[in-house]
Amino acid sequence: MIQPDFSKYALALIHEGNVVYTSKNQGLVPLVECIEACSSRYQNCRLHDRIIGLAAAKLVVASRMIISVFAGVSSQPAAEFLQKNHISLESLLTVPHIIGRDGASICPMEQRAMATEDADLFLTEMRNFFRSPKDES
């Protein structure tokens, strides 16, 4: 099994023992891009991600290609959501919530994910949210 190496990437998708997608970028955009690029081509994948909050967990479930996750840090709501959806999670550290850049409040995307129950709807919202204006021309 490929061991996570967060010094080389922030996110990696593994299929049948091969790394098929990586990104060094932070946040949810790389996960949305990974789903866009890979969900029609791969199934039964493992995801390595530095941080798995509830927002990322909902995207993982909606992808329908990821069956296990390894995270450096995960939030308790993310862990519960993945477990409820039969996706295994290994995490070096589980925290009550992912904290935003201000260092005090819950991350805005974690908050947004708490307000949207349906994972598929959340994926659609994130696709629209991250779509750049140039994509519409």
Image: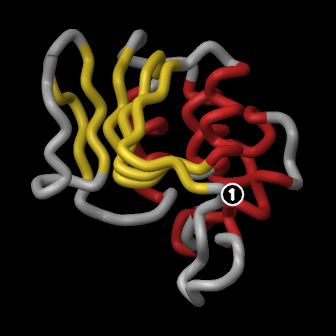
Q: Position of residue 54 (x, y in %)?
A: 66, 48
Instruction: Locate residue 112 relative to residue 74 in the image: left or right.
Output: right
Q: Position of residue 40 (x, y in %)?
A: 45, 20
Q: Is residue 2 left or right of residue 113?
A: left
Expressed as whole percent of the image width and height from the top left, the position of residue 91 reads 41, 39
Q: Is residue 117 left or right of residue 44?
A: right
Q: Residue at x 59, y 77 (%)?
A: 100
Q: Quadrant of residue 24?
A: bottom left
Which percent across, then down, holds residue 81? Answer: 70, 32
Q: Residue at x 82, y 52 (%)?
A: 114
Q: How many marks do you count on the picture? A: 1
Residue 107: quadrant of the picture:
bottom right
Q: Amino acid at mark 1?
A: Asn
User: Can you name the residue that lies furthest to the bottom here?
Assistant: 102
Task: Give me the residue at 19% from left, 38% from top.
Answer: 4
Asked if 122 appears above or below 109 in the picture, the reply is: above
Location of mark 1 (residue): 128
Which of the two residues, 5 or 131, is positioned nearer the viewer here? 5
Name which residue lies at 15% across and 16% down.
1
Is 121 above or below relative to 55? above
Q: Nearer the viewer, residue 101 or 104?
A: 104
- Near mark 1 (Cα within 10 A), the count class, few <14, some 14-19 or many ≥20, is few
